[in-house]
Image (cartoon, helix red, strand yellow):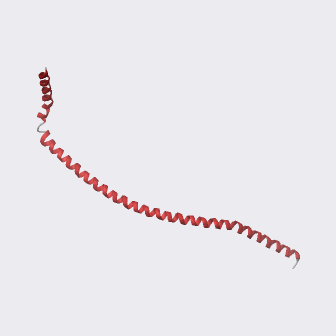
Amino acid sequence: MNPTVTAIVFVVVVLLAVGFLLLVVTLVPTIIQLKSLLKDLEKTSSEARELAANLKSISGKVEEDIGKVDHILNSTKESVDVVKNALKLVDKSFIKKSAGLLALIPAIRFGWNLIKKHKRR
């Protein structure tokens, strides 16, 4: 082989070797960083699974509590209806029928206070 061709082949091989060396030097830290990133991703994924499981249990508890609140609201509504009906009954039977007499109560109190003042003198 011609010494020029040998020198050119040698330079090309050296350049390829240097290029490969630079490639390895830059890729090794990248691969190491990717491995650590993968470990962190696995940890994050497991934490996300745990959080999702916790969220499901909390969601179930909230749904149970909503059912209880719904029951309480229905009971309260029934109680309010009973009180409303009782007040209507009192209004119809007692207050409307005795409205004339109830209007006299302030006058009776006024008269009673005058009698008490008169007795004191």
Quadrant in the picture for residue 23? bottom right
- Percent position (x, y) of residue 101? 11, 34
Task: Out of 34 and 5, give the one closest to the viewer.
Answer: 34
Q: Above or below — where is 78 with respect to 53?
A: above
Q: Residue at x 15, y 43 (%)?
A: 90
Where does the N terminus fall, quadrant-wise?
A: bottom right
Q: Residue at x 50, y 63 (%)?
A: 47
Q: Residue at x 30, y 55 (%)?
A: 70
Where does the C terminus fall, quadrant-wise?
A: top left
Q: Residue at x 20, y 47 (%)?
A: 83
Task: Out of 101 and 7, give the one closest to the viewer.
Answer: 101
Outermost residue to the bottom: 1
- Percent position (x, y) of residue 40? 57, 64
Instruction: Name the side, left or right, on which 29 lies relative to 121.
Output: right
Quadrant in the picture for residue 104? top left
Outermost residue to the right: 3
Q: Above or below — where is 37 with respect to 113?
A: below
Instruction: Name the side, left or right, on which 44 lies relative to 55.
Output: right
